Image (cartoon, helix red, strand yellow):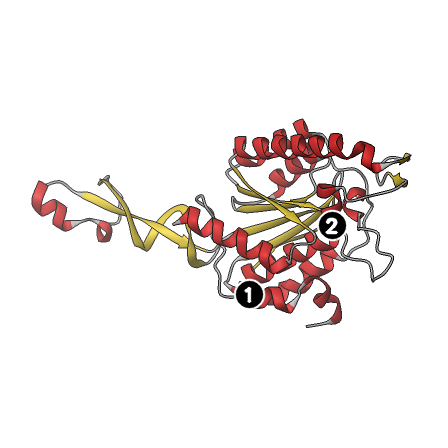
């Protein structure tokens, strides 16, 4: 593992998720025989249904036992078991650059660093179990992209995509998700890593566009502890990351109203995710990456089973 890859692939996180399976909740397409269900019917181990024989059907697929009982020809159809196609969409907008001020220790991870670590770890897991994994970094458009591949060496391309210099424009979810939906060749699991700061109506419309194309959706809603808890005390100057504005104030006078606004924001985005049948998970940058991943994988495993 190179020094660059260690930045977004912490060994302690990979060690904990290495024995877990990432499974798609809905029917997905794939390119290899594996553990995930495909909408395509073919010769596989899992029986799907019978249908009446029509001229031209392969006689090897006739269920002769049914014919013996009913004196009619029926074809056995099966459900393919295929690998997952996993698409990672990482928000690279300016708001993702927030990191808490640290005066007595080294600075912590930015929200983007945390999101990229989550994405790279899921990519590693997908590739390790034979899935095809692709990655995009976006703000108001897709800025860097690597197509879905199954080779384990493809992890270097994913990490390289995450480490490219960013433009840091505000997010445009509807435009980006439409563009992504038009370029993804097959249905799969699309996992979004973002603070979701942007137009929430556009977010909802973008999610619906992806759902209409048959994708299974999941969101890691990445927020810093400071954004959720507002721990500031004493006169403080706040500087905008996406707007050229500053505010100097006494945070204690704003705390109650701020926390109410945050809860309203979280409730709104959870509702919009649910309306799009999108898995939603709020994660704090103070939470260990491996814990966030284990929670996500365990929940999806329960849904699947």
* Residue 162 placement (x, y as % from top left): 73, 55
Determine which residue is flagged by label 1: 16
Mark 2, residues whose alpha carbon is within 10 Å: few (<14), some, or many (≥20)? many
| Residue found at x 48% / y 49% | 299
Q: Nearer the viewer, residue 177 or 106?
A: 106
Q: Nearer the viewer, residue 32 or 129?
A: 129
In the image: residue 173, left or right of residue 123: right
| Residue found at x 52% / y 41% | 215
* Res. 167 mark: none
Q: Nearer the viewer, residue 149 or 93?
A: 93
Determine which residue is flagged by label 2: 111
Q: Of the two numbered discs 2 and 1 on the same chain, state the one appearing first in sequence.
A: 1
| Residue found at x 64% / y 48% | 283
- Based on the displayed image, in which of its 4 quarters is residue 280 positioned? top right
Q: Is residue 224 visible?
A: no
Up/down of 71 relative to 145, above or below:
above
Q: Is residue 3 visible?
A: yes
* Residue 107 placement (x, y as % from top left): 82, 58
Where does the N terminus fall, quadrant-wise? bottom right
In the image: residue 73, left or right of residue 218: left
Please tell me whether mark 2 sits on a helix, a strand or a loop.
helix
Up/down of 188 relative to 159, above or below:
above
The single residue placed furthest to the bottom in the displayed view is 1
- Based on the displayed image, in which of its 4 quarters is residue 39 positioned? top left
- Based on the displayed image, in which of its 4 quarters is residue 282 positioned? top right
Q: How many marks?
A: 2
| Residue found at x 62% / y 53% | 134
Please tell me whether mark 1 sits on a helix, a strand or a loop.
helix
């Amino acid at each position: 593992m190179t020094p660059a890859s260690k930045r977004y692939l912490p060994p302690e996180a990979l060690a904990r998720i290495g024995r877990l399976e990432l499974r798609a909740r809905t029917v997905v397409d794939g390119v290899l025989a594996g553990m995930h269900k495909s909408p395509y019917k073919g010769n596989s181990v899992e029986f799907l249904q019978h249908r009446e024989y029509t001229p031209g059907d392969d006689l090897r697929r006739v269920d002769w036992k049914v014919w013996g009982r009913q004196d009619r020809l029926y074809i056995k159809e099966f459900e393919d078991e295929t690998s997952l196609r996993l698409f990672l969409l990482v928000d690279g907008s300016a708001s993702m650059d927030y990191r808490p001020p640290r005066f007595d220790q080294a600075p912590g991870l930015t929200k983007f660093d945390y999101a990229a670590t989550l994405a790279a770890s899921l990519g590693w897991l997908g590739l390790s179990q034979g899935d095809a994994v692709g990655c995009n970094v976006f703000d108001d458009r897709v800025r860097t992209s690597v197509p879905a591949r199954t080779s384990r060496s493809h992890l270097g391309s994913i990490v390289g995509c995450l480490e490219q210099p960013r433009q840091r424009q505000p997010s445009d979810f509807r435009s980006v998700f439409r563009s992504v939906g038009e370029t993804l060749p097959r249905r799969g699991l699309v996992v979004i890593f973002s603070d979701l700061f942007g137009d929430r109506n556009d977010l909802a419309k973008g999610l619906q566009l992806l759902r209409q194309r048959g994708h299974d959706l999941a969101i890691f809603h990445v927020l810093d502890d400071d954004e959720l808890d507002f721990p500031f005390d004493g006169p403080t100057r706040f500087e905008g990351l996406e707007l050229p504005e500053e505010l100097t104030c006494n945070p204690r006078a704003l705390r109650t109203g701020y926390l109410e606004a945050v809860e309203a924001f979280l409730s709104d985005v959870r509702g919009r995710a649910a309306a799009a049948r999108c898995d939603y998970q709020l994660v704090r940058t103070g939470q260990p990456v491996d814990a966030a991943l284990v929670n996500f994988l365990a929940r999806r495993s329960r849904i699947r089973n």
